[in-house]
Image (tube, grey):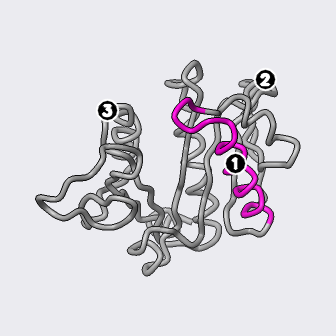
């Protein structure tokens, strides 16, 4: 999964995570609700997973600056995907000033091509259910993803009617896409 993609004439590069990117990622993508220490620890963990092949982390660079990122897991952390060997797209994030330029679409379709090259039949992702993620929910549908039929989950576990859950990034609906049509076209 060590591919590199470049968009000619647009100064956009998709590149794999490297150790020298970690400080820039922590500086640019530390969110108030998480803090720099937790963000740094997460990026250290992701870098180790990237190096071991457990997670492929891809950075979106525009004019040499990191403006987004995402990762691809061949072994999903979501049980139904894990059982069915569905590749999981995780944590796609594009900086606010760079949104609505097709960068998330570029990153997701790039992950699809990697999964396709690995002969995966399906690829999927979990998307939080509150308004901040409305664009991501719509993007999934536009790109041909459908709900996986398992309903909402909280921290990857199906929600139970009548029980209360926090409305946060862990309350998700999971989407899946069949890649076999792409394989049949070749």
In the image, taking residue 160 as reference, residue 142 lies left or right, namely right
* In the depicted structure, whether residue 104 falls above or below residue 53: above
* In the depicted structure, whether residue 32 falls above or below residue 116: above
In this view, the mark in front (1 or 3): 3
Q: Mark 1 sits on what residue?
A: 58
Q: Mark 2 sits on what residue?
A: 63
Q: CA distance from mark 3 to mark 2?
A: 30 Å
Q: Which of 76/15 is in front?
A: 76
Give the x, y percent position of residue 6: 76, 39
Lower sequence index among marks 3 and 2: 2
Give the x, y percent position of residue 89: 53, 56
Quadrant of the rendered structure where residue 48 is? bottom right
At mark 1, the secondary structure is: strand
At mark 2, the secondary structure is: loop
Residue at 55%, 29% (x, y): give it: 32
Q: How many marks?
A: 3
Q: Which of 85/126 is in front?
A: 126
In the orientation shown, which residue stands out farthest toward the right?
20
Residue at 39%, 46% (x, y): give it: 140
Residue at 59%, 64% (x, y): give it: 73
At mark 3, the secondary structure is: helix
- Checking the image for residue 30, the label placed there is none
Q: Mark 3 sits on what residue?
A: 131
Question: Is residue 127 one of those drawn in magenta?
Answer: no
Task: Count neighbours of disc 3 (C-alpha within 10 A) and say few if under 14, some if 14 to 19, many if 20 or more.
Answer: few
In the image, taking residue 51 as reference, residue 87 lies left or right, namely left
* In the depicted structure, whether residue 120 falls above or below residue 140: below
Q: CA distance from mark 1 to mark 3?
A: 25 Å
Span highlighted in magenta in the image: 31-51
């Amino acid at each position: 999964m060590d591919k590199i993609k470049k968009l000619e004439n647009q100064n956009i590069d998709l590149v794999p995570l490297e150790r020298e990117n970690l400080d820039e990622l922590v500086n640019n993508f530390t969110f108030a609700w998480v803090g720099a220490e937790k963000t740094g620890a997460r990026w250290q963990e992701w870098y180790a997973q990237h190096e071991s092949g457990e997670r492929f982390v891809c950075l979106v660079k525009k004019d040499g600056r990191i403006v987004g990122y995402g990762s691809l897991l061949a072994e999903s952390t979501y049980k139904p995907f894990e059982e069915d060997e569905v590749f999981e797209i995780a944590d796609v994030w594009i900086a606010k000033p760079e949104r609505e330029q097709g960068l998330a679409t570029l990153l997701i379709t790039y992950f699809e091509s990697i999964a396709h090259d690995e002969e995966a039949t399906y690829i999927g992702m979990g998307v939080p259910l509150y308004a901040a993620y409305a664009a991501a929910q719509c993007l999934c549908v536009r790109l041909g993803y459908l709900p996986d039929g398992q309903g909402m989950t909280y921290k990857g576990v199906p929600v139970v009617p009548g029980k209360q859950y926090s409305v946060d990034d862990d309350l998700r609906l999971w989407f899946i896409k069949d890649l076999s049509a792409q394989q049949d076209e070749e």
